[in-house]
Image (tube, helix red, strand yellow):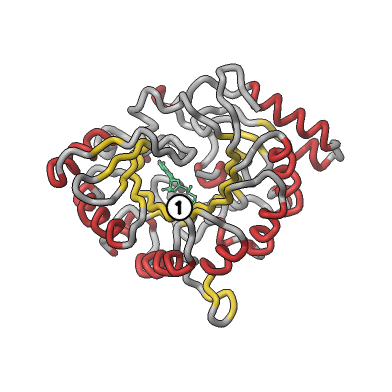
Amino acid sequence: MQDRYGHRISYLRVSITDRCNERCNYCMPQELQEWLPREDILSYEETLRLIRLAADLGVSKVRITGGEPLTRRDVLHFMRALPKIGNLRDIGLSTNGTLLAREVEPGLTMAAALHTAGVRTVNISLDTLDRQVYAAITGRDFHSHVLNGIDAAIAAGFDQIKLNCVLMRGRNEDQFGPLIEFAGASNLILRFIELMPVSTNEVLDERNFLSISEAKRAIESYYGNLVPEAEFRTNGPATYYQIPGRNQRVGFIGAMTNLHFCENCNKLRLTCDGKLRPCLGSYLEFDIMTPLRAGASDTELRQFFLDVVDRKPKEHDFRNNYQPNRKMIAIGG
Ligand SMILES: C[S@@+](CC[C@H](N)C(=O)[O-])C[C@H]1O[C@@H](n2cnc3c(N)ncnc32)[C@H](O)[C@@H]1O
Ligand code: SF4
């Protein structure tokens, strides 16, 4: 699949739930959260059919996300079905990490079960190593769960584990060093992500926004000049660097300040309530659940995918103070 600007779409990010066991203040509005009714959420079978059709059209990588994907019932049943879809070469998961160490059966952690199910890469959110700050950001005192989850993921033997840290002035700029040391000790890739205006108006303003260039400067003042790694890409919009004198990679995702951010975009999103979204930072989304449930054929649904890809915008609209009427948690980060 290719759009009118030459973006080749090979990556489908799939949200399987809008629910979450945390309340990150940049992701979820503070007011009482109303979850979507069960019947408005795609069933696993429906989601698998859409992934299969996308794979027919050239999608080779899927990342399962949410909300918190591991809170959905029978998630392992779903994950185990993914490798059976031909053409998928890379199956990834984004998680807050809180449930990775949970035993799904005696002696078997969720992380190990996911690895056995065929998950190859795991992205775990970790904005701080300070337990109290973690609780203030996420609304939950789950820091130790996440650290145990990271240990479980390491023990499970995934091909790649990335830690994602959202940059927030006044909240975690003192954490760059500790997080780098933490990631380096376990050979994990740490990525710093600019705050995006995706959920609520108050989530982002000039006081709490921290750019990747400022974070990079702060890191360089301590570690020395970072060495660009132009050839290392992970199918995403991050730019990667080596920390001098070490074998350690850090990444930066600058949705707000990197003007070339969208040039190599290869991504399409499927929301948990059955919308295809060609870009996170655009209002555009297209309801594929209605034709799916009305009995559309595979050919018709494949054409739906192609039509959505054709409407993919040239670039996101975050810089124009984009505020979707949809929460990040429903879209799937
Ligand atoms: C929406 S979450 C879903 C998966 C999982 N619950 C997690 O937290 O990793 C995916 C990613 O989006 C990021 N995210 C959420 N809201 C954001 C925002 N306003 N700006 C930047 N990143 C955000 C989270 O930090 C997380 O790394
Ligand atoms: S970022 Fe992830 S963990 Fe935090 S509220 Fe959003 S979905 Fe939940």
Q: Residue furthest left?
A: 221
Query: Toward the viewer: 281 or 53?
Result: 53
Q: Residue at x 65, y 35 (%)?
A: 276
Q: Quadrant of residue 184?
A: bottom left
x and y percentages locating residue 315 in the rendered image? 48, 22
x and y percentages locating residue 164 in the rendered image? 38, 49
The answer to whether residue 141 of the structure is visible from this angle is no
Query: Toward the viewer: 332 or 148?
Result: 148
Q: Quadrant of residue 285?
A: top right
The answer to whether residue 131 of the structure is visible from this angle is yes
x and y percentages locating residue 108 in the rendered image? 55, 76
- The image quadrant where one finds the N terminus is top right
Query: Toward the viewer: 188 or 276?
Result: 188
Residue behind mark 1 = 123
Q: Residue at x 52, y 57 (%)?
A: 20
**Kind of residue at badge 1:** Asn
Q: Residues within 10 Å of mark 1 (few under 14, many from 20)?
A: many
Is residue 34 placed above or below 99 in the rendered structure?
A: above
Q: How many marks?
A: 1
Q: Is disc 1's CB within 8 Å of ligand 1?
A: yes
